[in-house]
Each structure stands twice: as structure tokens, then as C-alpha cells.
Image (cartoon, grey):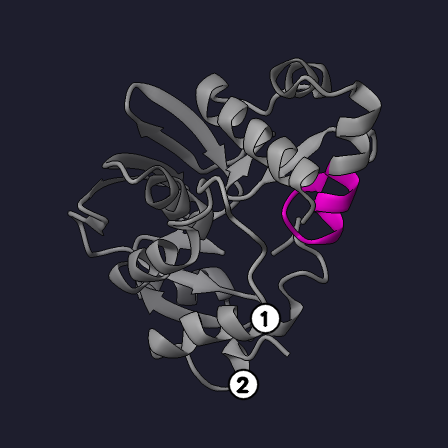
Amino acid sequence: MLVFRSEAHVDRWLAGRSGGVTISITKLAELAAAWWSDRLDSNWQPRSREKNQAILDELGLIGDFWHLG
Amino acid sequence: MTSVDVAIRNGTYAAFVELGRAPTIREVADRTRASVSDVAASWARLQDSHALVLDAAGAILMANPFSAIETPHRVEAAGRKWFANCGWDAFGIGAALSVDCTIHTTCPDCNERIDLDIRGGRPLDETPVFHVLVPAREWWNDIRFT
């Protein structure tokens, strides 16, 4: 899970290999806020797979690649 | 999680935030007034529930989003610094702390430094992109690689 300077840098880095999925840095910020903002809460509990999937779904990160299984 | 595990987890994370590095088992035992063996047992249970990742010696490797080892992803906030496990976790540290922060990372393609100021949860520079190489269903198959 890596930050690149631009999509062109991702393509050059992959050099023809099949990669994963590239999202904008603003979408990553939204994802991080939804995923991690409760991590230091004193009553934090591990989230269920369903709740994690709901976070991805609500951010429009849908499809087979984003399916937690 | 049991109340003991909640207390050990909270003590572990509080120490990580405060110290800017992973706490030792002794530091968490002292902080939580538990025995070293109780902390070790709790950390093992927390790892089983994906709440921590331990190394082969039983020490903290990841208290996501914080990393115990040096990585290319460094986060500065509130006068302190932490290593993050990946680009996602780097954003996660500011989110978890609810503070503005600066992320220092490196483009894997060109090795140029990327410095991202995050204000109100948003990066001021929206030029960089984020690449997820591993499909979501495989994230925990090898969390170190992910």
C-alpha cells in the first residue's frame, strides 16, 4: 500500500506487471478517517468483517478487488 | 475482548503514542500493573483478533496504524514522530490522533521524497495517488507484505 507521485509513476513502477487498484490521495484520506479514527478509543473492539466491508462500500470502493472475502 | 485485554491494548497504544515507538512488554506491564506473563498472554490474544501484530520474539511489530520498526512512512504530529506500516496507515495515524500532521514518504518509482501536509483530514497537495497492490481478501494473509 504505497503512495506515488502520480499515476504515471505507478505505471512505470509496475513496468507491465499486473498491479492492483489506484485511488486518489483524497479518497485514501477519507478511507483512513473511516477506518482508523476510532482506533485509540478506550472501548475500541475489533470490527467485524461486515462492518469493515460497509466502510469500503460507503466510500465507493466496491467490486471484487475490495471484497474482504 | 476481555476487560483485561482492553486494558492491555489501551496501555499499549497509549505508550506507543507517548513514546513515539513501540513499548516493551515491561513498560506495558508497569503501566497497566499487570505481570509480564499476563501482558504476553494478552498480546497473543490481541494478535489472534487482528488487534496487534507481534514479531517472532513476542514483541510488538505493529499496533496498527503504528509500526515498531523503521519504514519509509514517517508521520509528524503534535511535536512527535511515529513510523507507519504503509501509506494507508500513515494517514491513519493522523486520523487516530485526530490531529493535523505531516506525512513523509518516498515514491517507490523514482525514490523522490513526498511530504504531505494533512489539515482537517485532507491533504493540501492532492497530486499523489495511492496504489493498493493486494486484493482486500488477501490483506491479512501476509499483513507484513500488505
Does any portion of residue B70 appear in the rendered image?
A: no
Residues packed near mark 2 inside 10 Å, few (<14), some (14 to 19) or many (20 plus)? few
Which residue: 78% across, 41% down? Answer: B44
Residues packed near mark 1 inside 10 Å, few (<14), some (14 to 19) or many (20 plus)? few
SS class, disc 1:
helix
Marks 1 and 2 sit apart, C-alpha to C-alpha, by 15 Å
From the viewer's perspective, tell me whether residue B67 is left or right of residue B17.
right
Q: Amino acid at mark 1?
A: Arg
Which residue: 65% across, 53% down? Answer: B145
Which residue: 47% across, 60% down? Answer: A13
**In the rendered image, which residue does mark 1 sit on?**
A49
**Does A51 appear above or below B114?**
below
Of label 1 and label 2, which has the lower sequence position? 1
**In the rendered image, which residue does mark 2 sit on?**
A64
Task: Give coordinates of residue A15: x percent, y percent.
Answer: 50, 67
Tag of residue A13: none
For the C terminus of chain B, give its image quadrant: bottom right
Q: Do labels 1 and 2 touch, CB within 8 Å?
A: no
Q: Chain of mark 1?
A: A
Q: Amino acid at mark 2?
A: Asp
Point out the stretch of residues depicted in magenta.
Answer: B43-54
From the viewer's perspective, tell me whether residue B107 is left or right of residue B5.
left
Query: Which is nearer the eye, A35 or B81?
Result: A35
